[in-house]
Image: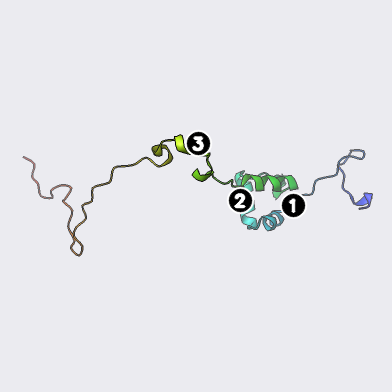
Amino acid sequence: MPPALVRRLPGAEGGAPLPRLYRPEEIAEALGCSAWWVKDRARRGLIPHTRVGRAYRFTAAHLAEIVRLHEERPKRSLSSAPASQAATSPPAARTRAARPPEPTTAPTPGRLRARPPRRTQYETVA
């Protein structure tokens, strides 16, 4: 690339080149999502961005950070735990806390049953 076409920081002698700024539409295309999603997340402050006036702009470092923020790591499963740890841990620790079974008051099939009233409607107070 000819040196005349490389943008440099103003006032810096042979200074660092300016970073390339991407529009939300370009970031959305790279991420495979909508530009609305990118602008909404930037407005809420959930993804890194730069504001130039009223416009949202992104650098390559911002894009890499967005990808890193939304990365999901695999969860450890019991099969990946060491055998000694799996054998020594009690079964209750590996499963959810057991709740006692709720009593079932299901009516017989095919027949509906009214629930008892919460209060009597015509009760008089003495």
Which residue corresponds to the image point at 87% horizontal and 44% vertical from the top-left?
A: 8
Mark closer to the observer (1, 3): 3
Residue linked to disc 2: 40
Q: Position of residue 110 (x, y in %)?
A: 20, 65
Quadrant of res 46: top right
Quadrant of res 88: top left
User: Which dot marks residue 84?
Assistant: 3
The answer to which of 55 and 88 lies nearer the viewer is 88
Which residue corresponds to the image point at 67% horizontal and 44% vertical from the top-left?
A: 48
Query: Does residue 100 show up?
Result: yes
Density class for disc 2 (Cα within 10 Å; few <14, some 14-19, many ≥20) is few
Instruction: Check disc 3 and give the amino acid type.
Output: Ser
Cα distance between the residues tagged 1 and 3:
51 Å
Which residue corresponds to the image point at 18% horizontal and 48% vertical from the top-left?
A: 118
Instruction: Check disc 2 and give the amino acid type.
Output: Asp
Task: State which tag comes first along the sequence, 2 or 1.
Answer: 1
Callout 1 touching callout 3 (CB < 8 Å): no
Quadrant showing the C terminus: top left
Q: Position of residue 92 (x, y in %)?
A: 39, 38
Q: Answer left or right for 109 relative to 39.
A: left
Q: Position of residue 65 (x, y in %)?
A: 68, 44
For this orientation, the residue located farthest to the left is 126
Residue linked to disc 1: 22
User: Which dot marks residue 5?
Assistant: none
State the SS at label 3: helix
The answer to which of 56 and 103 lies nearer the viewer is 103
Query: Does residue 59 show up?
Result: no
Badge count: 3
Instruction: Check disc 1 and give the amino acid type.
Output: Tyr
Callout 3 touching callout 2 (CB < 8 Å): no
Q: Position of residue 105 (x, y in %)?
A: 20, 52
